[in-house]
Image: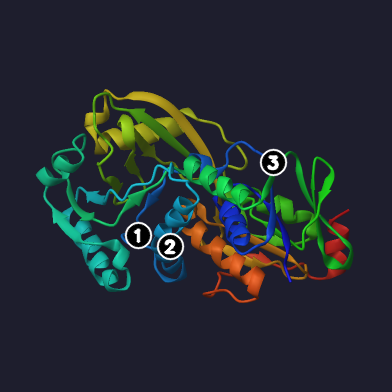
Amino acid sequence: MTTSAVVVGAGIAGATVAFGLARRGVAVTVVDGELGGRATAAGAGIIQPWSSAATGPYYELYARGAAHHPTLIAQLAELGITDLGHRRCGSLVVADDPAAIDAVEARLRARRPAAPAMGAVERLDARAIQDRFPPLRDDLHGVCVAGGARVDGRLLVAGVINAVEQLGGAVRRGTVAVRPAPAGRVDVTVDGQSIDGDVIVVTAGAWTRPLLGPLGTAIDVEPQRGQIVHLHLAGADTAPWPTVVAVGDHYLVPFDGGRIVAGATRETGSGFDPRVTAGGLQRVLADALALAPGLADATLVEVRVGLRPLASGMVPTVGPVPGRPGAYVATGYGAAGLTMAPVLGDALAELIVTGRAPFELPAGALRPPPTRDRGARAGR
């Protein structure tokens, strides 16, 4: 029986696993190294998976995550936590080419019966698109997905951690290490002090691979740098504006008070380098202004950089660590962490407590060591 757990990592992956465990009566300690470049702190927070060109297990998890979000929001509200930057504002998918929007619309309508959270799907002309998001160009083609939403990643994680603490959990911050322990188990330390738990859950995002290294466990997850720009558009009531997703890989996310987030670069091979670069900033601004020239006079407020945990096969890894009793892992969400992590975190918590997950968890890219002896040598 699991009565206590240590969760390594306080991003959206770790926070939601910890919340799921705490809600099920487990005493949780969250430990975090507060490393620069955490993906959750930079994430734009678009909750709209249904227009994605992704298929198979990745899309299924993506859509499942969006369907779960209202449950998480309601659970937090029951604890008095409502400041999450969340709004069901709708989402525009736009493109220069009407044929590209034809394909998106067909995909949305085919998926809608299995995804009621999507809401209505409406084809829009250029005037209607600009009416809903005035800075956009006046010659775009698009479709509106009424169920699209957005959330502030920093506020959401802070809210979930607050909920964990309200339920009796604790948070420890410092230098975190994961090492082999007797009987094949795992020891977690913070600033050299061992933190005890019946189970250990490693949810360290892009840092999961180096953390698991001493266990001799390989996982194909690497950091992918994303640079994201925050703008302020003075005098604009941006609260009700929809998110905007261009066919391709850039987007605009409006928040209250004239704030608009533009992103993002996808810099595979960046390593653990959370710098703002001239080229990255130029690309994000060029894409944003090409899509929405009305943002040219907006104030550049800040640039955030997140190191996404990118899995080699795109599908996350959530479940037990082979050969390590009581050890689990949840990582590899890539750019979809704010959408996927809450539902997968809750499912992993259910698996840990009851031995059964509510749906099949993704195996992803976790590989056990060839032998236990080799794993022990790797820990020295």
- Upstream in the sequence, badge 3 or badge 2? 3
Rendering quarter of residue 323: bottom right
- Residue type marked 3: Gly
Q: Do the residues labelled 3 and 2 touch (CB within 8 Å)?
A: no
Mark 3 element type: loop
- In the picture of the structure, the residue carrying the numbered disc 1 is 52
Identify the residue shown where x is 40% and y is 25%: 301
- Residue 286 appears in view: no
**Alpha-carbon span between mark 3 and mark 2:** 28 Å
- Residue 26 appears in view: yes
Crowding at dot 2, Cα within 10 Å, few <14 / some 14-19 / many 20+, comes out as some
Q: Which mark is residue 33?
A: 3
Identify the residue shown where x is 39% and y is 68%: 55
Mark 1 element type: loop
Crowding at dot 1, Cα within 10 Å, few <14 / some 14-19 / many 20+, comes out as some
Identify the residue shown where x is 31% and y is 36%: 288
